[in-house]
Image (tube, grey):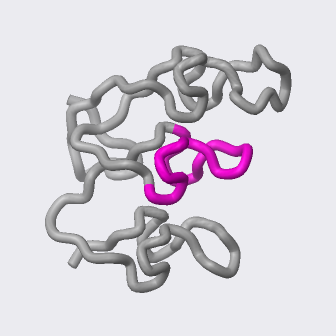
Amino acid sequence: MSQVKNDPSRVADLEQITCAFCHGHGTDPFGVMSDRSTCGACGGRGVVSVPTPHVRCAYCDGTGSHKTFRCLVCDGTGVVAAPTGPTQTCPSCDGLAFERSSGLACLTCSGRGVVPV
């Protein structure tokens, strides 16, 4: 068992999934540095380790990217750890996962779109 990133109190099993940011190719999908640049999300492996259970990232809609950058919420994996216990739609962003005024990840729900009840 490994600890889940950003939540030291929760321990979960890890699962290998295809990198959402590079679609499993292992290179930067936007070719910012060059068309052979290593993907920053998976380190060129094409797969990433994510906690189980997990859910689609609400901030990037599971794509792993926001504009031409890696998603700030899921770090390019396209998924986040599933919340434990009952949740409700975030009252600050109405479940959008981002602030309407700035487009940045919602501070109340940390870009997840839901908060604990």
- Report x, y in % for residue 36: 77, 14
Of the 4 image quadrants, the one containing the N terminus is top left
User: Could you tell me which residue is drawn at 63 percent across and 67 percent down?
Assistant: 104
Q: Compared to 86, does 57 lie above or below? A: above
Q: Is residue 71 magenta?
A: yes
Residue ranking furthest to the left = 85
Q: Quadrant of residue 86?
A: bottom left
- Report x, y in % for residue 32: 82, 31
Q: Which residues are magenta?
A: 58-76
Q: Is residue 101 left or right of residue 32?
A: left
Q: Quadrant of residue 5?
A: top left
Q: Is residue 64 magenta?
A: yes
User: Could you tell me which residue is drawn at 60 percent across and 18 percent down?
Assistant: 26
- Report x, y in % for residue 83: 25, 58
Q: Compared to 84, does 93 lie above or below? A: below
The secondary structure making up most of the magenta span is loop
* Residue nearer the viewer, 8 or 48: 48
Residue ranking furthest to the right = 33
Residue ranking furthest to the bottom = 91
User: Could you tell me which residue is drawn at 64 percent across and 29 percent down?
Assistant: 40
Q: Compared to 36, does 74 lie above or below? A: below
User: Could you tell me which residue is drawn at 48 percent across and 37 percent down?
Assistant: 77
Of the 4 image quadrants, the one containing the C terminus is bottom left
Q: Quadrant of residue 27?
A: top right
Q: Compared to 3, does 33 lie above or below? A: above
* Residue nearer the viewer, 63 or 77: 63
- Report x, y in % for residue 25: 59, 17
